[in-house]
Image: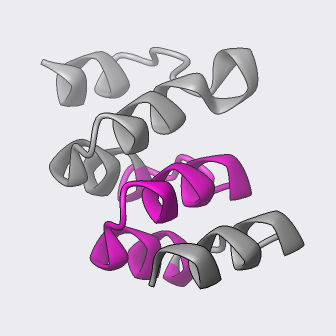
Amino acid sequence: MVELLIFFGAKVEIKDNMTLILASKSNDFDMVKLLLNNNIRADSNALKAAVEKKNWRMAEFLMSKGAVPTPEVVRIFEENK
């Protein structure tokens, strides 16, 4: 369904990339991959959520798509590794 919405031009990046952040906070790696593979920009907020959930595969994928870790993300990683 989301793929169809994206195909028809749904703006999934509105509200400061909330769709990607919620997918990351929900630990929904399939949705994160779907969004990023459809040219949704990766950001440090989604990366932070993945690191907080200790979802290292998702965090690595987000960084491979351009998410840049902030000092806060690095601190959270150090606390949760």
Residue at the front extreme, as displayed: 79
- The image quarter containing residue 8 is top left
Magenta segment, which residues? 36-64
Query: In this image, 75 relative to 65: left or right?
Result: right
Residue found 29% across the figure and 16% down from its top: 5
Examine the rendered structure and indicate whether residue 69 appears above or below residue 16: below
Q: Position of residue 32 (x, y in %)?
A: 33, 49
Q: Position of residue 17 (x, y in %)?
A: 64, 31
Residue 68 seen in the current view: no
The N terminus lies in which quarter of the figure? top left
Decide whether the magenta segment is chiefly helix, strand or loop.
helix
Residue found 58% across the figure and 24% down from its top: 18
- The image quarter containing residue 9 is top left
Examine the rendered structure and indicate whether residue 16 appears above or below residue 8: below
The C terminus lies in which quarter of the figure? bottom left
Residue found 49% across the figure and 69% down from its top: 62
Query: In this image, 14 relative to 62: left or right?
Result: right
Query: In this image, 66 relative to 3: left or right?
Result: right
Examine the rendered structure and indicate whether residue 4 appears above or below residue 70: above
Query: In this image, 17 relative to 5: left or right?
Result: right
Residue found 74% across the figure and 75% down from its top: 75
Q: Position of residue 58 (x, y in %)?
A: 34, 68
Examine the rendered structure and indicate whether residue 25 appears above or below residue 22: below
Does the magenta portion include 56?
Answer: yes
Q: Position of residue 59 (x, y in %)?
A: 45, 72
Does the magenta portion include 61?
Answer: yes
Residue 58 seen in the current view: yes
